[in-house]
Amino acid sequence: METVLKRWISIARRTDVPEMRSVSNTISRRKTYILNAWEYGRTNAIAESLNRQIKDIIRTCRGFMSFAALRRRCLLVLGHKQKPNKPIPLFTRSDKRKEGAN
């Protein structure tokens, strides 16, 4: 695979298309990572996807009052099957608001 990649890089560098030369430079710099991903068949794509989903949950909910609430929401959205032991309120009111409601 390494020889094929080197051959492609050399061909791409000799073209008149500036985009191909730019891509070949990028691939040349990242060649070690590309070869490792090809050899072992693993990338960090799953971790990146989970990170993006968690960020989307935080943005959609416009913040959480506690880490436990965020954790429960992430487990719910990401398909965790275990049921929680007890409910955790997402929003808590301050004492002043409770007094004002009476």
Image (tube, rainbow, N blue to C red):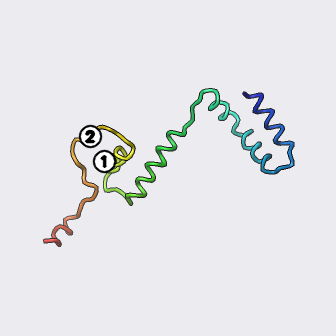
- For the residue marked with disc 1, what is the amino acid? Ala
Of residues 51 and 11, which is closer to you in this image? 11
Query: Which quadrant would residue 7 be assigned to in this image?
Result: top right
Give the secondary structure at mark 2. Answer: loop
Q: Mark 1 points at which residue?
A: 68
Give the secondary structure at mark 1. Answer: helix
Going from N to C along the chain, the mark reached first, 2 or 1, is: 1
Q: Pick out the residue farthest to the left.
A: 102
- For the residue marked with disc 2, what is the amino acid? Lys
In contact (CB < 8 Å): disc 2 and disc 1: no
Q: In this view, does 95 lie to the left or right of 24?
A: left
Above or below — where is 11 with respect to 96?
A: above
Tell me the CA gap for discs 2 and 1.
14 Å
In the rendered image, residue 2, in percent from the top left (x then y), is placed at 74, 28
In the rendered image, residue 26, in percent from the top left (x then y), is placed at 72, 43
Q: Residue at x 35, y 43 (%)?
A: 75
Where is the N terminus found, in terms of image quarters? Answer: top right
Q: Is residue 28 left or right of residue 80?
A: right
Above or below — where is 25 with respect to 66?
A: above
Q: Which residue is drawn at 86% across and 49% down?
A: 16
Above or below — where is 70 with respect to 84?
A: below
The crowding category of the residue bearing disc 2, from other C-alpha atoms within 10 Å (few below 14, some 14 to 19, many at least 20), is few
Foreground mark, 2 or 1, reads 2
Q: Residue at x 45, y 48 (%)?
A: 53
In the rendered image, residue 18, in percent from the top left (x then y), is placed at 81, 51
Q: Residue at x 26, y 40 (%)?
A: 83
Q: Is residue 47 left or right of residue 95?
A: right
Q: Mark 2 points at which residue?
A: 83
The crowding category of the residue bearing disc 1, from other C-alpha atoms within 10 Å (few below 14, some 14 to 19, many at least 20), is few
Above or below — where is 59 with respect to 31?
A: below
